Amino acid sequence: MTSRERLLAAIKQQPTDRTPRHEHFWPETVDAWIEQGLPADTELADLADVARSDMRGILGYDHTLRLEEAVLEETDAYRVIRDGNGASKKYWKKHSGVPEFTGEFAVQTREQWDNYKDRLLNPDGRMDVAERVRVSRELRDSGHFVYWGVLGFWESARDILGPETILMNVAADPDWICEMIEHFEAQFLTMYEQLRSAGAYLDGLFIYDDLAYRNAMFMSPASYREIIWPSHCRAFGRVHEDNLPVIFHSCGRVEQVIDLLIEAGVDCLQPLEAKAGMNLAELKAKYGDRLAFMGNVDVMVLRTNDSDAVRREVMNKLQAGSKGGGYVFHSDHSIPPEIALATYRFCQELVDEFDHKRLGG
């Protein structure tokens, strides 16, 4: 099987010649692994080869209001910027992660939203279409599964309002938040049509839309269904018209809305955070005939760099995920620099070992 065939078969819960693989990495992992033996010119994208990933992605588009950006403060440790949504954020220089909102926003009321919202619907300059077409065709020729990675509608709206304002208005003014989500849906559909009409090659959509935190959803399932789900249904339905699967990323504990995600058109759920209580074996038993899974290998175990603990974790997840097909090997989020290169290579060897025994090679 080619990588493309392997991934597509897994998403359809069909047999594969080996366990499909993919991975995400924190940028700091590159420098750590260079010190541990990778070539000095290794870049973040090169780690896909270390992961033996069957997937490669092309970039999304600028989803912001495209307001003027500025650096507001800079020290040796961090940088505070005003981004394209007019929101101030602190980025730490020596470690990655979600930036901290620092309190300045261009939009905090519905009236302010009305002043800016039409800016989202102008597609000009949001994406270098020709470059994405070129890269997509190169990746097609390599035999990999080619996905378009985009930021989801909820996260895009949250980036404008900040977490407190958007969550307050899910309760206080759900019609406003629904309107915001619909604007980002329209933006996505416009950019998707632009990319497809230009001749980009795609095998699927990978959409990143964090709906939950460690313990539960950011909103009730009823609020998700009312505010976000209709846009997910329409957008994913359009992608399915082109016979492309939808891979949906959400951190946190999203169990409460998995049925709704499936109904909306999600074909594969990622990353299944173990530290949020997502249990691959239970999810497979309940949803495995309708949904593929990617992830759930606990990075908190991998970062111990204890070979016995790592072996137990990897083998347990492979055993749970392989039943009936429909599983892609991946961590439960991203690989941090605390996980040694030797440990990660050991994980790959364990997948090989598992496949050898399972397939009788």
Image: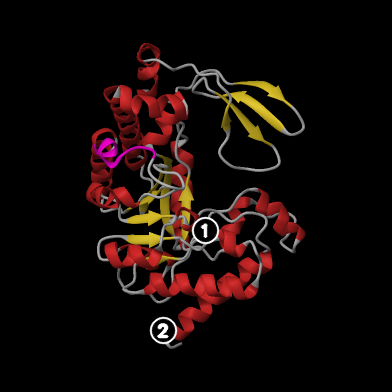
**Percent coordinates x, y for residue 131 in the rendering:** 49, 41
How many numbered marks appear? 2
Q: Is residue 287 left or right of residue 68?
A: left
From the image, tell me which residue sits under label 2.
Answer: 359
The label shown at residue 216 is: none
Q: Quadrant of residue 9?
A: bottom left
241 vs 350: above or below: above
Report crowding for label 1: few under 14, some 14 to 19, many 20 or more residues within 10 A (C-alpha).
Answer: many
Residue 230 at x, y = what percent? 23, 37
What residue would you read off at disc 1? Answer: 23
Asked whether the residues under the numbered discs 2 and 1 touch, taking CB atoms below 8 Å apart as contact, a structural biologist would say no
Q: Badge 2: few (under 14), some or many (20 or more) residues near its Cα, within 10 Å?
A: few
Q: Quadrant of residue 112?
A: top left
Residue at left offset 46%, top offset 79%? 355
Which residue type carries mark 1?
Answer: Glu
The residues colored magenta run 218-225
Query: Would you place residue 219 above or below residue 315 in this image?
Result: above
**Amino acid type at mark 2:** Leu
Asked if residue 316 is positioned above or below residue 215 in the image, the reply reads below
Foreground residue among 19 and 338:
338
221 magenta-colored: yes
Q: Is residue 209 left or right of residue 176?
A: right
Looking at the image, residue 279 sits to the left or right of residue 334; the answer is left
- SS assignment at label 2: helix
| Nearest to the observer: residue 228 or residue 39 | 228
Q: Nearer the viewer, residue 128 or 5?
A: 5
